[in-house]
Amino acid sequence: MIKRQYLSFKNAFFGLIFILKSQTNFKIHIFLSILALFLALFLKISYYEWLVIIILIIMGLVIEALNTIIEEAMDLISDSWDEKIKIIKDMAAGAMLIFAFGSVFIAGLIFLPKLLIFVIK
C-alpha cells in the first residue's frame, strides 16, 4: 500500500515537472503569483485577503494544468489539424482566460486601495 502511494505521488510530481518544463503560460502564472505574494506581504493584507489570493493562485495553477491536459489529450487523439479539436483547445484556453480576468479584477479590489494609500502617504 505504501509503495502504491509513493508511486502515485511520484507520478503526480513527474506530471508537474512536465508542465513546468513545457508550458510557458504555467511559468508566467507562477512568476505573477510570486509577485502577488510579495505585494501582499509588502501591503500587509488581511488574513481573509490572503485566503482569497492563495485560493486564486491555486485555482489558476489548477486550471492552467487542466488546460495543458486537454491540449495534450487532443494532440494524442489527432496529430493533424482538426476543426473540432481546435475548438476544444480554444474553449479550454478560454476558460483560463475567464479565470485570469476574474483574478486580476479581484486582485485589483484587494491591492489597488492599499496601493493608493501607500502612494498618497
Image (cartoon, rainbow, N blue to C red):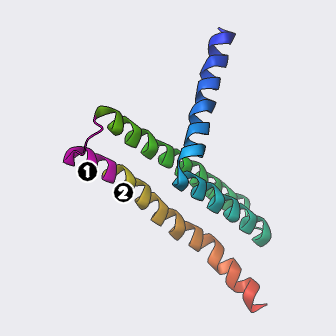
Where is residue 106? Give x, y as percent: 54, 67
Q: Residue furthest bottom?
A: 120
| Residue in the image at 57% along x and 55% along y | 56
For label 2, count other residues whose C-alpha is less than 10 Å away and answer few (under 14), some (14-19) or many (20+).
few
Front-lying residue, 4 or 50: 4
> Along the polypeptide, which appears first: circle 2 or circle 1?
1
Q: Say if 1 sits above or below 24 in the image.
A: above
Front-lying residue, 24 or 9: 24
Residue at which label 1 appears: 87
Q: Is residue 44 visible?
A: yes
Residue 116 belongs to the span the image colors magenta: no
Instruction: Relative to 11, say whether 15 is above or below.
Output: below
Tag of residue 109: none
Identify the residue at image location x=63%, y=32%. 13
- Please name the amino acid that badge 1 sits on: Ile
Q: Where the N terminus falls, by quadrant?
A: top right
In terms of secondary structure, where does tag 2 sit?
helix
Percent coordinates x, y for residue 16 in the rendering: 59, 37
Residue 94 got which mark? 2
Looking at the image, is 68 positioned above or below residue 4?
below
Q: Residue at x 71, y 61 (%)?
A: 37
Prevailing SS of the magenta stretch: helix
Residue that lies at the very extreme toward the left in this rendered image: 83
Q: Residue furthest top?
A: 1
Secondary element type, mark 1: helix
Magenta extent? 78-90
| Rendered residue at 43%/55% (across/down) | 96
Asked whether, in this view, residue 27 is left or right of residue 2, the answer is left
Q: Using residue 49 as the reference point, say whether residue 70 is left or right of it.
A: left
